[in-house]
Image (tube, grey):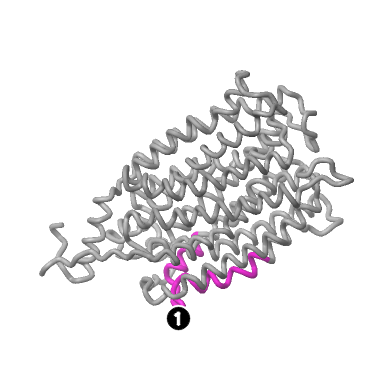
Amino acid sequence: MEAPAVSHRHPSLATKLFYGFGSVAFGVKDNGFAFFLLLYYNQVLGLPERSVGLAIMSALILDAFFDPIVGYFSDHFRSRWGRRHPFMYFSALPVAASYVLLWNPPEGLSPNGLLTYLVVVAVIVRTMIAFYEIPSSSLVAELTNDYDDRTTILSYRYFFGWWGGLTMSILAYGFFLQPDAEHATGVLNPNGYHTYGVVSSVVMAIAILISAMGTHSYIPYLRQPTERPHGFVATYRELLATFSNRSFIALFCAAIFLAMAAGLIAALSIYFNTYFWEMTSNEMSVVVMGNFVSAAVAMVIAPRVSRHYGKKSGAIRTALALTIVAPVPVALRLIGWFPQNGSPALVPLLFVANMAAVTLIIVFSVMMSSMIADVVEDSEMTTGRRSEGTFFAANSFVQKAVSGIGVFLSTVLLSTIGFPSDAKPGSVDPQVVRTLGMVYVPFLIVVVVVVIAFLSRYRISRAGHESNLRRLAERRAGVDTSDA
């Protein structure tokens, strides 16, 4: 029997835009958790930084264990709207309502009551966003099976995710978190956080609904679920077989260290901006605005890197470049080769350095996600099942659980070096601030090197992916592939 040709689906520009736009919701949520939540509950509401860090870590870990459940059931869910879209539509209103509550805690709560409130509401927010993010991100492996198209589509997704989160950060720094008569430092103004929560929730709900409706017409062409195993033991065996894929294990281990570093660095970034560089809210807005350029540049560069080097080699090269670019400003300040705080050159230099580092981070993230999409067919060759939701849920599990540990480690670090609560910029002991930088630089370099080591174990090349597609097409057509 003649082997069937592999058919590649190439989504339209409109599909790429609708698919990508939904990640605005995740970007807004992620920026809020990464950059504002710790500072808000610690410096604004007055809870000890270690308690807040432990609360955030607990919430992230509790929520993370729910992600594989969402991913697994979205792989096996049957409805007239397919496997993914019912979850996506359902999530919009709960996401919006819970995010408002996170930034508007009831007045009069005791410290323990406020901590409990933080954990409960944070878990609800992240669980509800998982109902959208995991099924939505899983769609990339169904919208196209083309090696390069997957990278392109994910570039749109990361572009909108970053632009959505960054836009809310700009609004927060430039409009919401502004000084008033009672609060001389804008990021310590509680009223700004209340407004930020309301506006963010509306944006998130709109993004989710637009993306779900924009990809709704693809439902008839998406893959149908396989029969779900009955019983706990059968389900456990199916998951074990799915996660035993060697390339996925390599990505999973790399993601563990990457997420830990991301959680720690994101939580510390506002401390660096406020106390290490002593920037005002408006100056922070200027630096953050460079990330808009980063997201746009990364959207163009990532597909080209994938086509020229392949995803594995492209990801490793990007990570190596990141180890050089990201620590440079802090390292130069520690040795006295960077402009002093308040210098006219400080903000422009930080703008350029941050823009370059973020571009590399986004390109690397796109590569990682695209590599996960290619694991789907590699796993299907062995298991006979499409497990997009399960794989992307496992990646989300790592990002949440381990980044939560990173956030907690940031609070441990702040406590260990003696960083004061309710600190005012310029009033912190210079040695404490210097110690913060001395820990940051080597930590970042070591973690990225470990990530590269795990990525080197990934085995799916362009040729390997095409081979998987060809053999799967032969299998569906009933062609003997035993000698393939």
Camera-side residue of 401 and 212: 212
Judged from this view, the residue extending furthest toward the right is 181
Query: Measured from the top left, where is residue 57 in percent x and y?
Result: 63, 48
Q: What residue does disc 1 label? A: 80
Judged from this view, the residue extending furthest toward the left is 1
Give the answer, above or below, for where 286 lies relative to 236.
above
Q: Does dot 1 land on a helix, a strand or a loop?
A: loop
In the image, residue 449 lies in the stretch drawn in magenta: no
Going by the numbered disc 1, the residue's amino acid type is Arg
Which residue does the image show at 85% across and 57% down from the upper left?
A: 107
The image quarter containing residue 9 is bottom left
Which residue does the image show at 62% across and 55% down from the upper left?
A: 28
Specify the principal SS of the magenta part: helix
Start-end of magenta stretch: 68-96
Circle 1 residues within 10 Å: few <14, some 14–19, many ≥20: few
Q: Quadrant of the N terminus?
A: bottom left
Give the answer, above or below, for where 209 lies relative to 316.
below
Camera-side residue of 309 and 389: 309
The image quarter containing residue 186 is top right
Judged from this view, the residue extending furthest toward the front is 344
Which residue does the image show at 62% across and 43% down from the upper left?
A: 288
Position of 211 compared to 337: left or right?
left
Query: Measured from the top left, where is residue 430 in percent x and y?
Result: 73, 23
In the image, residue 86 lies in the stretch drawn in magenta: yes
Camera-side residue of 293 and 448: 293
Which residue does the image show at 38% across and 71% down from the upper left?
A: 222
Could you tell me how many numbered marks the image carries?
Answer: 1
Give the answer, above or below, for where 438 lies relative to 168.
above
Query: Measured from the top left, where is residue 242 in percent x and y?
Result: 37, 58
Position of 358 compared to 231: left or right?
right
Position of 334 compared to 38: left or right?
left
Q: Quadrant of the C terminus?
A: bottom left
